[in-house]
Amino acid sequence: MTKERTELATPYLSGLLEFWLTKSVAGRPPVPSSIAPADLRPWKDNIAVFEVIGEEAGTFVYSYYGRALAAAFGQSRLGATLDDLPPEQRAVLQPEYETVRRERLPVARVHTAVFGGRTRSFERLVLPMSSDGTSIDKLLVAAYEMTPRELAARPPTHSPGPAPGPGGGSSGPVPLTVQKPGASA
């Protein structure tokens, strides 16, 4: 856990990652109970929280879905699972979320796809949380639409992935390897 940390283009995501680091203790992801809903106020409209049910191939249930996400994607997914998504979207998200569970580290990526008839890009950050310090039982996911200027300023990445389209992405997940959760940068 000592690789260089990838820079995030979206300042709000950088702030959320820093907040997550302050809640991490002894190299472990934060305990969900250590984060009050009021703590997430700066990001509340752009986050989704997943409850992870099951040990191996978990079921991911949306337990919170921010207003900006509902507006951007045309509906709230509150109470739904990843299994309720179209297969092409699930094929992108399921492996990413399983990687975060297994590695116990944040992952970020830029996702470009057609939403509502137009191509849009979102920078996403997936943060693990653990109630017992062992298993990842919640994921905090944030997404912010990127402006053309932010996209142009971003260094090119070359990662294989699905072609752009509904649920497809132009950039695969990029592990955000931090010094150690809970350590100051």
Image (cartoon, rainbow, N blue to C red):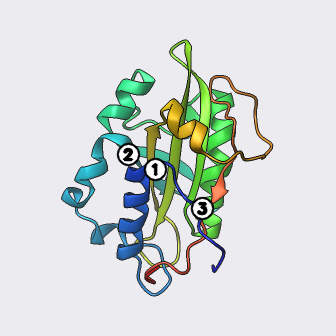
Instruction: Indicate the position of residue 28 as horizontal and vertical percent values.
Output: 48, 79
Q: Quadrant of the N terminus?
A: bottom right
Residue type at mark 3: give it: Thr
Residue 171 appears in the picture as rendered = yes
Crowding around mark 1 (Cα neighbors within 10 Å: few <14, some 14 to 19, many 20+) is many
The residue tagged with tag 1: helix, strand or loop?
A: strand
Tell me how far mark 1 sits from mark 3, CA to CA. 17 Å
Residue type at mark 2: give it: Ile
Tell me how far mark 1 sits from mark 2, CA to CA. 5 Å
Disc 1 marks which residue?
141
Write the residue at 50% across / 39% down.
Answer: 81
The residue tagged with tag 3: helix, strand or loop?
A: loop
Instruction: Indicate the position of residue 78 as horizontal and vertical percent values.
Output: 36, 36
Disc 3 marks which residue?
6
Instruction: Indicate the position of residue 175 as horizontal and vertical percent values.
Output: 64, 61
The residue tagged with tag 2: helix, strand or loop?
A: strand
Q: Is residue 26 left or right of residue 37?
A: right
Write the residue at 63% across / 32% down.
Answer: 89
Query: In this picture, is 100 found above or below 3?
Result: above
